[in-house]
Image: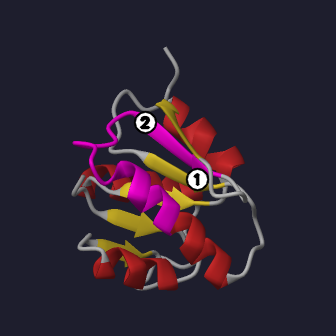
Amino acid sequence: MRDPFLIDECLSPDLVALAHARGYDASHVVFRGLTGTADRDLLPIIRHEGFVFVTNNAKDFLKLYARENIHAGLVIIVPGGIPAEVQVRLFAAVLDEVEAMADLVNRIVEVFSDGSVEIRDWPME
């Protein structure tokens, strides 16, 4: 899996450093000058640049992605408000899980506080 990641502003920029260390292309919403951009306004950027979006805002992004016919993938770090080092540990678990996959097209990846990872089709058929 080599699609680029875009990390949401609600998550630590340390996730970008982890992705880079593991050989992935990644950026952060803040690095791109998109701080405060409405979720619905991020989606065209995500779509146009083929990003796998990483967030902990499941509520809003599951709704937005449910309307997409095709997307590069969505990663949700389920527990919100967690320290950066925990975010990094959980994102590392995601990278371990998806590394051998060809892509995450039309898939959602959820990682939970215990480090377990669930991958499913989204939108659900």
Question: Is residue 93 placed above or below 107 in the rendered structure?
Answer: below
Q: Where is residue 22 in the image (x, y as percent from the top left)?
A: 30, 74
Residue range in magenta is 92-111
Measure how far apart labels 2 and 1 are at the Cα level.
11 Å
Say whether disc 2 or disc 1 marks the residue closer to the N-terminus.
1
Question: Is residue 78 placed above or below 103 in the rendered structure?
Answer: below
At a point 74% along the width and 60% down the height, the residue shown is 79
At a point 32% along the width and 49% down the height, the residue shown is 47
Q: Nearer the viewer, residue 41 or 57?
A: 57
Q: Position of residue 58 (x, y in %)?
A: 66, 49
Which amino acid type is marked by label 1?
Ile
At a point 40% along the width and 66% down the height, the residue shown is 6
- 96 inside magenta stretch: yes
Query: Would you call the spot at circle 2 few (<14 residues within 10 Å), some (14-19), or many (20 or more)?
Result: many
Residue at the spot of label 2: 107
Choose top left, top right, bottom left or bottom right for residue 12. Answer: bottom right
Choose top left, top right, bottom left or bottom right for residue 114. Answer: bottom right
Q: How many labels does the image show?
A: 2
Residue at the spot of label 1: 76
Q: Position of residue 106 (x, y in %)?
A: 38, 33
